[in-house]
Image (spheres, rainbow, N blue to C red):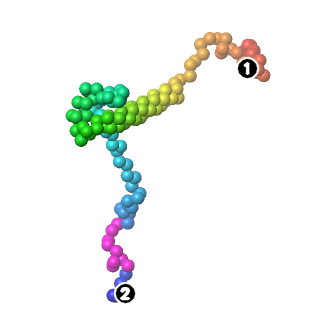
Amino acid sequence: MDMNANVSDFVPNTNVAEFVPATAIPVTQPEMQPPLFGKHSSFFAHQGVLSQEQMVFVFQHYPQYSMNPLEIVDWLFVEAQNIEYAEAMQREAYQRQQYQSKLRYQPEPESSSEEEQDTVFTHNQKKKKP
């Protein structure tokens, strides 16, 4: 080994400004939602026995669960309710934001009556302007 060798001889030439550690990049993976095929959570509700439509749905879309279709229908019911709840919360947050922005930018009403314009408040007493 050469005693006069620099550290830069062993380090590959890379631009340090372009290097970003992997931990600095946030990894966001989209949430995987089960394919409900446009069905509402009420479709997956049952009383321990599946309906004809539910059985057809399971055999058509989830044939691997045909031996125990109640399992998949129960799971789909819970997942559908979770999705509907999340959507309702997003709608409510959006409506709240719209309402607050409407209040924030709403101009103050102008008083039109002369009595309100001629009134002076001093020491908690109402007096007319001279």
Which of the 4 image quarters holds residue 75? Answer: top left
- Mark 1 residue crowding within 10 angstroms, few (<14) / some (14–19) / many (20+): few
Residue 8 magenta: yes
Q: Quadrant of residue 127?
A: top right
Residue 61 falls within the magenta-colored stretch: no
Give the answer, above or below, for where 54 lies relative to 3: above
Which sits earlier in the primary sequence, circle 2 or circle 1? 2
Left or right of 111 on screen, residue 14: left
- Mark 1 is on which residue type? Phe
Number of marks in picture? 2
Q: Residue 81, how many percent across, how many down?
A: 39, 32
Front residue of this view, candidates 8 and 25: 25
Name which quarter of the figure residue 76 lies in: top left
At a point 35% along the width and 30% down the height, the residue shown is 48
Which amino acid type is shown beneath numbered disc 2? Answer: Asn
Q: What is the C-alpha distance between the residues marked 2 and 1?
A: 89 Å
Magenta span: 7-15
Residue corresponding to mark 2: 4
- Name the residue beneath numbered marker 1: 121
Expressed as whole percent of the image width and height from the top left, the position of residue 61 reads 23, 36
Q: Residue at image x 75%, y 16%?
A: 126
